[in-house]
Image (cartoon, helix red, strand yellow):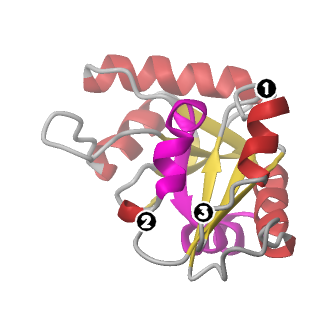
Amino acid sequence: MPTYVAFLRAINLGANRKVPMADLRACLADAGLEDVETHIQTGNIRFRTPARSVAKVEGLLEDLLGERFGFEIPSIAFTTAQLRQVHDDALAASPPQGNATGERRYVHLFKAGQAPTGDVADAIAAWEEPGEAGLVIGRAVHVWIDGPSQQAAFFNAFRKPLAPGTNRNLTVITTLAEKWCA
C-alpha cells in the first residue's frame, strides 16, 4: 500500500482556520487511511492508502477535511519517493545568482501543474535582490533568504505564482524526509 506525505495549506494561521492535529489524525483514520502521523501544527501528514494517484489523494483529503472542518483546505501530496527527491534537490541546489548564503532556506511546494514555469520560473531564477534567491525545480520553488523572511522582497514579488503552493522551511522538509521517506 502506497505511503504519502501531504502538506496542508493555510491552516492554524488565525482564529478561523484551526485544525487540531489530533482531530486531523482522527478524521483521516476514520476515513480509512492507515498509519496516520502528523508533524508539528502546520499540517504535515504521513499516511498509507490504497489510492495510486497523487491527484486522487489530494482530492480525497480536500473533500474529507472540508467536510470535517467546514472550510476549504488545499492539500499538496507527494509519494515518499517524490518528497525524498524534493529534499535531495534542496540539498544539491545552490542560489542561481549567488546573491544569498541561505541563512534561511524555504521550499515552496505545489500540486502537479501548479509550480511556476516558463517566464515566471526564469524570473525567479534571475531574481537579484541582495540576500535573496530562488530556483524552480519540479514541483518546488527553493528559496534562500539572508535575514527575516517577513522582510524579504522575494515573497511579495512572486506572491501570485506562489499562491497555490505552501511553504515550509528546509528544516521541516529535512525532518520529514529523514523520518518518513527512509
Considering the numbered disc 2 on the image, is that residue within a helix, a strand or a loop? helix
Q: Which amino acid type is marked by label 3?
A: Glu
Specify the principal SS of the magenta part.
Answer: helix
Query: What segment carries the magenta color?
Result: 153-182
Sequence-earlier tag: 1 or 3: 1
Q: Are marks 1 and 3 in contact (CB under 8 Å)?
A: no
Image quarter of residue 41 = bottom left
The residue tagged 2 is: 149
Looking at the rendered structure, which numbered label has been put on residue 129?
3
Q: Is residue 176 magenta?
A: yes
- Figure check: 161 above or below 40: above
Alpha-carbon distance for marks 1 and 3?
Answer: 39 Å
- Figure check: 150 above or below 55: below
Q: Which amino acid type is marked by label 2?
A: Ser
Q: Would residue 164 be seen by someone viewing this image from the given angle?
A: yes
The residue tagged 1 is: 53
Considering the numbered disc 3 on the image, is that residue within a helix, a strand or a loop? loop
Q: Position of residue 22 (x, y in %)?
A: 30, 51
The answer to whether 94 appears left or right of 148 in the picture is right
Q: Position of residue 21 (x, y in %)?
A: 33, 51
